[in-house]
Structure formats: structure tokens, C-alpha cells
Image: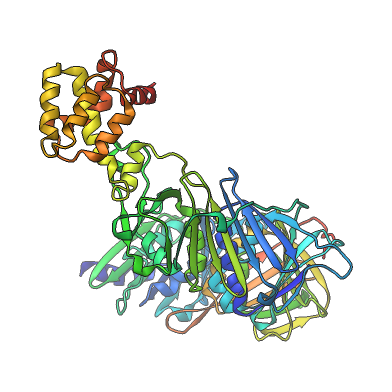
Amino acid sequence: MPLITTQAEEENDYSLVASLDNVRNFSTILKAIHFREHATCFATKNGIKVTVENAKCVQANAFIQAGIFQEFKVQEESVTFRINLTVLLDCLSIFGSSPMPGILTALRMCYQGYGYPLMLFLEEGGVVTVCKINTQEPEETLDFDFCSTNVTNKIILQSEGLREAFSELDMTSEVLQITMSPDKPYFRLSTFGNAGSSHLDYPKDSDLMESFQCNQTQVNRYKISLLKPSTKALVLSCKVSIRTDNRGFLSLQYMIRNEDGQVCFVEYYCCPDEEVPESES
Amino acid sequence: MKCLVAGGNVKVLGKAVHSLSRIGDELYLEPLDDGLTLRTVNSSRSAYACFLLAPLFFHQYQAAAPGQDPLRCKILMKSFLSVFRSPAMLEKTVEKCCISLSASSCRLVVQLHCKYGVKKTHNLAFQDCESLQAIFDPAACPYVLRAPARVLAEAVLPFPPTLAEVTLGIGRGRRVILRSYQEEEADNPAKAMVTEMSVGEEDFQQLQAQEGTAITFCLKEFRGLLNFAEPANLSLSIHFDAPGRPAIFAITDSLLDGHFVLATLSEMDPHGQDPGCPELQRPVPQLQAHSTPLLDDFAGDDMDSYMIAMETTTLGSSREGPRVLPSRSPSPRAPSEDDEAESTVPGTPPPKKFRSLFFGSVLDPAHSPQGPSPVLAEDSEGEG
């Protein structure tokens, strides 16, 4: 196979080379943040971080650590490029998106550096597809300056408990109000829609609650349209960590277990809605 | 008003709301001493539905705060439905449901107590309203059908989801017939298919209606009620009267009862009724086979051929022949005579005449000046 030998020879020319036996371990995580067309990728020797942003208010990061890949080489300290995420996901599922039992699609991903396309070699059952996706000028991503030392309240929930709540969110409400408090109602999600308001309360001693560390009552509102896309990550995840800092910024961290039992994380940051929440029962 | 629904009854309540949502956009809640009523009416006021949940249905039921009159309210169906969005989920996660309405808070509060101590509270905006009450009396209906909802649900299963109306009637051998109702555009090939289901008398617990009775009503609402009654293993009774009179669909259980009152189509034109229940309306095909072609021919052909035709037609039963001939010759348009002849004269008309049955309306305008008949007049009216 001349293709392979060329690769081997040029191996050192690539600033990023990553290969993976099961492409779904990569594509699933990317789907969890796929709510905008474009994404920025950062690769370091630790792995790849893919970032998607919207409205300068919400940011989603998917971390695929080096250990997920069977081979992972980064020649420079960090490699950054912007890419059309929709196209990337389409290519990664070029052999079909619904898994066939026992059949895995392998992936080899190479990037030569600034100005070059991202090369994908996908192989399933001896058939190889080569995709070249043009990369774009990386854009500066937002820094939410969300520092764990500033975290006021933190809750870890089993995702099961939030899944239904998020899928049934009253989208006629403009905001999702999150209340976290050391006292009742402990953890409350509220919407204020056309039909009226609704509240969802989780007691701190619920079996769904893995951890409850709330120091101070905080009531913050977030644009529901910005948070709704995080349902994609929620659906895939087994646990979610919900944190707010002293400014009311929200961090949602989703723990996603892949088909090989390895754990990856997806994180959403969202800034609070400016409007001061008025008290409603 | 305050009531508490526990366990599996939450799902029953949810399903009742789902079936009501097939009818109206607004839900009327009225607590009575003998239970909580949930009612709705559709926008054209042709369908009304009501569930009465008996006090025993609830874990706890209080129609009104002591010393106060019960409040009633009207809320958007959509918002109430969103509380009970997924009946499967209700069964899995909801342990109890508390509905309360008080004069002090201007909200209808629905609380769902779910697994893991999770509590969902919906504060729904409502409007004051008059009591919604349709006037109907199942006992006043001369005809009654009663069968397990499953039998009827299976019978309507083959109908396409887009089908608007269905005709229910009693056919030959007292078989109950459900047939897709077609509007007049029978020439539209997309609508040319008619689906008919026939259920034997033995599947019915009660069948009090004679052969030939039939009503046509909306399928969507009927399916809504069946979706509720079938999983609950309930019997459904259908009380009805002449076409055009409302039909009452009722289910009763020790804890609840439900009544759906649906309008039925008032007049069935011959084309509509014929596909509706051919077996029920035996005279109809005969009527067309004999009278229409004869009149057509009389108008178009000369008298001799008409006479010949009459003779061939009546050969089979000479007894009727003499009666028919004189009555037709002097006055071919007398409708009463025609009807009488049709229903009594057996035999097959000549093929040509049979054909004109189908093209009768097309031929009419040319023939009408010569011999206007009731049939012709009717057709040209329809065209104009």
C-alpha cells in the first residue's frame, strides 16, 4: 500500500498524528458539543480540546485525552486550528452513524500544520476513505475565568435525574433559573413560560445527588436557548457536576463513558442573564 | 379544591388529559361533590368530552375549602398536557400528584412527587369560567352498542391516520360495520379506497339497533377515547339516534366515567350513504339501478324502446309489471311511484341502463328540458 508508506515517511512532517481503533470514541464526544457549525481545536501532548461558542455567552469544551487514542503525537507545543464541525462529524461517520455490532471504524488523523487541511483516513472492513477538510484561521476563544477557588456552590448529580427535566424544559420561558442553596429548596430549576411557572426541586439527600456542597444561596438566570444545547451532552453522560462561581457564572461538567469504558469530559460555561431575578414562588 | 392522586392513577389522569386534548384547546376543571370533572369542547362545538373522577379515585379529595364554594377554572389544554407529557414516564417516575386551586393564589398548582424525592411544581395560569355542560341523555337514544374498547380499537386500527370520519352501522346478519367515510369526490383516485371492518354481533355485549341504522362521526375524537379505554380494559357504549343527532360514547368504571358527545353527519347523500353502508341500505343500489336509468332513457329515447326496456325489466316478476307500466307511462316523474317500484321490482336492468346510472349526472343537462325528474333536478342543483 503506497498510501501507508508515504505516511510513514512523512510522519515527522505532521504536527499532529492521532489514531484510534473505534472512531465513535471520538465522534460521540464531538456530538455532545455540536450546537454550532464551527469549532476550534487545540492539541497538546495531553490530548485534544475542541471548543464551540455561541453569542459570546456560552462555551462548550470537549476533552479527548491522549489516552483515548492508540497513537497520539504532537510535534509542537500546541497545535490550533478552526474547522467546520458539521463536516468533520459527517466525515467521521462516513461509514454510517449507526453502529453495526462487531464492526469498528478505525481512524487516523493527520494535520501538517498551519494552512494545511486536516486529513482523515477512515477504515472499515478493508475499505479506506480519505477525507481532507480545510482548516481555518483559529479564532480567539472566550476566557470565562472560571476558577475552582471561586466556586460558591457545587452539586454532582446522576445525569438520569436531569435528563427528563432538560428534555421537558418549557421553551416558552426565556430563562432557566437555577437556585442553589444550603437550605431549602437546595437545588431548584425554574422556568417562567406562557402557561405559568414551573419548578423542579431536588432534595440534597436524594439518591440522585452524589455530592452537595452549597455554601451560599444563589439564584441565577441563564438564557434557556443557550443552555438547551447542553442536552446533547447530558444525554450521553452518566454524571453531571453543576457549579456556580461568585459572579454567577455556570459550569456544567458532563462525564461521558465511551464504548471502551474510558471516561471523557465535556464542559459548558454560561454567563448569567443580566436581569435581576425577581422573587416568585 | 385540593386533590391528591397516587400511584397508577396518575397515569390514568394523564391519559384522560391526553384523550381530551384530541378535542379541545381549553380544559375546564370543575370540582364537584361527586368528583372532579375535566371537560372540553372543540372550537366548532361539534364535540364535547367529559371525565368525572370520583372521590375514590383520589387518595385525598376536597372539592372546596370548608365553608367556601368550589372554584372552577379553565386552563390551556397545552399547558396542562405538558405536565403529563409522557404517560410512560409518569408511570415510571411519578409517585403522586397533587392538584390544588385556591382563591388566594391565582394559579392552578400541580405538583408531581417523583422518584428520588424530586418534586415538580407547575403553577399554571387559569381563567375563571362558567360551568361547561353539554346537555345529553344516553337513555334518550334508541340505539345502543356496547363492546370492550379493545374490539372497537382493533376495528379502527386499519383506517388511515388521516381519515376524518368513519361510518358505524348495523349490516346484514346484525354485523357491526365500520367503514371509512368518503366525501363526494369519489373520482379522486387518492380517495378511491374504502376500508371496511365488520365485527360480529357476538363480540358485542349489547347490540340494540336494527339492521340499516348508521351514523357517521369523527374518528380522531373516537380514537382518543379508545386510547384511554383500551389499556384500562373498559367497555365502551355508543348511544345514538338518527343521523345528525349527537352520538354519545360512554365508559364507566367504579372510579371514573367518561362521556364523549360527537356530532354525526346529518344527511347522507346517496353517494355517501351507498359506500357508507351498502349492506345496510339494500334498497339503494336497486333504486339507482332501476329508476335513474329508466328515467334517463325515457327522456332520451322514444317511447317504444322505453316500453321494451320496461318489459324486459319486469319479465322476472310479472306480478309487478302491470302496476309499474301504467304508473310510469302517464306520469314518469312521480317519485312515490318510482320508489315503490324500485324497492319491489327485482331483476337486472339492461347493461346500457346500468351504465347510465353512473353517467346519469353527466347526461342530465341535455335531458332535463324534456323530462325533468326528481333525480335530474337534484343533480343539476348539485352542479349549480
Q: In the image as oriented, which residue stretches furthest toward the right?
A: B67
**Residue at 68% over, 63% down:** B37
Vertical position of residue B290 compared to residue A100: above or below: above
Q: Is residue B263 visible?
A: yes
- Residue B21 % position (x, y): 58, 57
**Residue at 60% over, 53% down:** B136
**Residue at 33% over, 60% down:** B174
Residue A88 lies left or right of residue B27; in this view the side is left
Vertical position of residue A175 compared to residue A264: above or below: above
Q: Which one is in front, B24 or A76?
A: B24
Q: Which one is in front, A235 or A250?
A: A235
Q: In the image as oriented, which residue stretches furthest toward the top?
A: B369
Query: Looking at the figure, which quarter contains the N terminus of chain A?
Result: bottom left
Residue B100 lies left or right of residue B138; in this view the side is right
> Which colouring convention does the figure follow?
rainbow
Q: Which one is in front, B281 or A249?
A: B281
Q: Can residue B350 be seen in this view?
A: no
- Residue B207 % position (x, y): 41, 63
Vertical position of residue B121 compared to residue B26: above or below: below
Task: Please tell me in which quadrant of the rendered image residue B113 appears.
Answer: bottom right
Query: Looking at the figure, which quarter contains the C terminus of chain A?
Result: bottom right
Task: Please tell me in which quadrant of the rendered image residue B156 appears.
Answer: bottom left
- Residue B225 % position (x, y): 51, 61
- Residue B336 % position (x, y): 33, 30
Vertical position of residue B40 compared to residue B185: above or below: below
